[in-house]
Amino acid sequence: MKKNLVENNIEEYFRTRNNKYEKKENVQLVLKNKKVQTISYFPQWFSGFVEREGCFSIRKTGEGSFCIGQKDDLFLIEAIKEYLQRQNKI
């Protein structure tokens, strides 16, 4: 995405967009070996993630709820759970 912002070439973006998974293992290792609270950019990343993948609801009972979903990257949900200091079952 950064390269596309500089080059402004949509064809190149479509050709290379799956490369975002090339360093997935590195991200998993960082999240596994560090406390999420020590990752300086995590609050900002989490804010963007919630905007895309989150849902705030008010149930018929009047009770509020929040949920997020992630199909393939369970490690992200586990990191968020740690960040929020929750005990919820994933």
Image: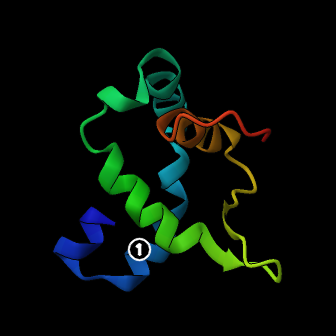
Residue that sits furthest to the top in the current view: 33
Please rate how many residues cluster around mark 1, counting C-alpha atoms within 10 Å: few if below 14, some from 14 to 19, many from 20: some
Residue at position x 26%, y 64% from top? 2
Residue at x 80% of width, y 38% of height: 89
Please indicate whether residue 50 sits to the left or right of residue 63 in the image. left
Is residue 57 shown left or right of residue 44?
right
Residue 59 vs residue 40, the one in the foreground? 59
Q: Position of residue 19 (x, y in %)?
A: 49, 53
Residue in front for this viewpoint, 75 or 51: 51
Taking 9 as reference, is 69 left or right? right
- Which amino acid type is shown beneath numbered disc 1? Tyr
| Number of marks in the rendered image | 1
Asked if residue 88 is positioned above or below residue 33 in the image, the reply reads: below
Q: Element type at marker 1?
A: helix
> Residue at label 1?
13
* Residue 37 figure quarter: top left
36 or 3, which lies in front?
36
- Residue at point 30%, 82% (across, down): 9
Location of residue 36 in the rendering, given as x and y in whole percent from the top left corner: 42, 30
Q: Please identify the quadrant where the N terminus is shown.
A: bottom left
Q: Quadrant of residue 78?
A: top right
x then y, percent, for residue 87: 69, 33
Q: Is residue 40 left or right of residue 50?
A: left
- Residue extending farthest to the left is 6
Q: Quadrant of the C terminus?
A: top right
Residue at x-position 67% and y-position 45%: 73
Q: How is the image coloured?
A: rainbow
Give the x, y percent position of residue 11. Answer: 42, 82
34 relative to 6, above or below = above
